[in-house]
Amino acid sequence: MVITGLGLVTPVGIGVQKSWESFIHGCDGANEMKSFDTSQYKVHRSCEVKDFHLDVELENQIKENTIHKYVYYAAREALQESGLSHDKSSFNKERFGIAMGTLAAELTPHERLLRLHTSKKDNGFDKIVAAVYPPNSITNILAQYFHFEGPTMVSLNACSSGNHAIAWAYDLLIENKVDVVMVGGGDMIPQTEFTHFHNLKALAPEHCQPFDKNRQGLMIGEGAGILIMERYEFARKRGAVIIAEMAGYGLSCDGFHMTAPHPEGEGAVKCMGDALKMARLSPSDIGYINAHGTGTPHNDKAETIAIKHLFRDHAYNIPCSSTKSMIGHLMGAASAVESVICCLALRYGILPPTIHYHTPDPECDLDYIPNRARELTVKHVLNNSFAFGGNNATTIFSKIE
């Protein structure tokens, strides 16, 4: 299965090119929260999307839901790069699928629905809010605007939702049920979600510092990442430019704790191992790992243990970085955005850094590409996402010569 188009909306840039430039320059997307009042909280920072605007006509059409706007923009960018937006009429729309990952779907309309002034509308039922709140509204709006008529799915597997959506898209394609899948994820920062992580004491007060000894937690982010995945035969027949190959995936569940990872990373080991088997690769083939790297003490330690367990001595030869240090944790969109980053690393031969890395942790002793991007041509990259409830998903992308 191959990738022919990419799209991004991130806290450090609107669009793939701007985001990528920010990634390789180590830009920090953290800022004081503007979406809602945080005066009653101890933490006031997050990674919000900045200076985002749609065309006036589209802004009026997609005015109820921020996620819809982010996902639409990234999807349009990816579709344009793939070349499919130019002549979709010549393809069978029923063989174009959509798979999206999200964590909160769109809790903000739900929060509005619960407010007194909103609940009084229409005898206590806000029809517009109800229409955009369900998670499937994300795929609904993409199908509507891009006229895809194939199967759709929304993954709600917490922070690994994007990679789960990619895995589902892979299966659809390899079983020849579709020719193309628009796949990825989108999320924003509702107050409910911010409060949840604040109450867990999981939020960093200033910056996200994955793998650093003094890391204090994650930074919540928002945005969207989209990939256009196609069957190789279909892409080749239409003369598409292939960015990368989606080589395999692995899925597992720790079943250990609702929020904490297995301390020895057992589920993560199985997940990464299964991805390698599907891709028919050995551990020594992997040239870069985009780590889950949330910046929380237990997660970073468990991921490091898992990588060392699976890759053995080669673990110390694999550069791995956490782009969450720059854009925060995009929740259900995180692994989708990070999959786009993996494809860009393959394309440009540059590995993004882990910023805010200052003090090494003896328990996290791998090569985390500290603070500066690294020029290195690699053939195979691995993307980890390990979610609450132990829901793990790893994807592998490979360079096609």
Image: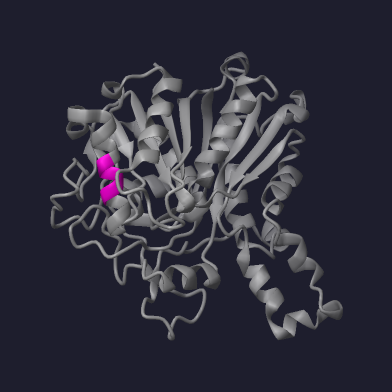
Q: Residue at x 46, y 47 (%)?
A: 255
Q: Where is residue 215 in the image (x, y as percent from the top left)?
A: 24, 61
Q: Position of residue 81 (x, y in %)?
A: 55, 34
Q: Image check: 22 left or right of 367?
A: right
Q: Image check: 287 left or right of 57?
A: left
**Looking at the magenta stretch, what is its main secondary structure?**
helix
Quadrant of the frame with the C terminus: top left
What residue span does the magenta drawing correspond to? 301-305
Q: Quadrant of residue 58?
A: bottom right
User: Does residue 108 sit above or below 239 in this rendering?
Assistant: below
Q: Residue at x 48, y 59 (%)?
A: 222
Q: Image check: 360 left or right of 186?
A: left
Q: Which of 213 and 166 is in front in this view?
A: 213
User: Does residue 349 sit above or below 333 in this rendering?
Assistant: above
Quadrant of the frame with the N terminus: top right
Q: Quadrant of residue 54?
A: bottom right
Residue 395 in view, yes or no:
yes
Q: Residue at x 73, y 35 (%)?
A: 151
Residue 14 in view, yes or no:
no
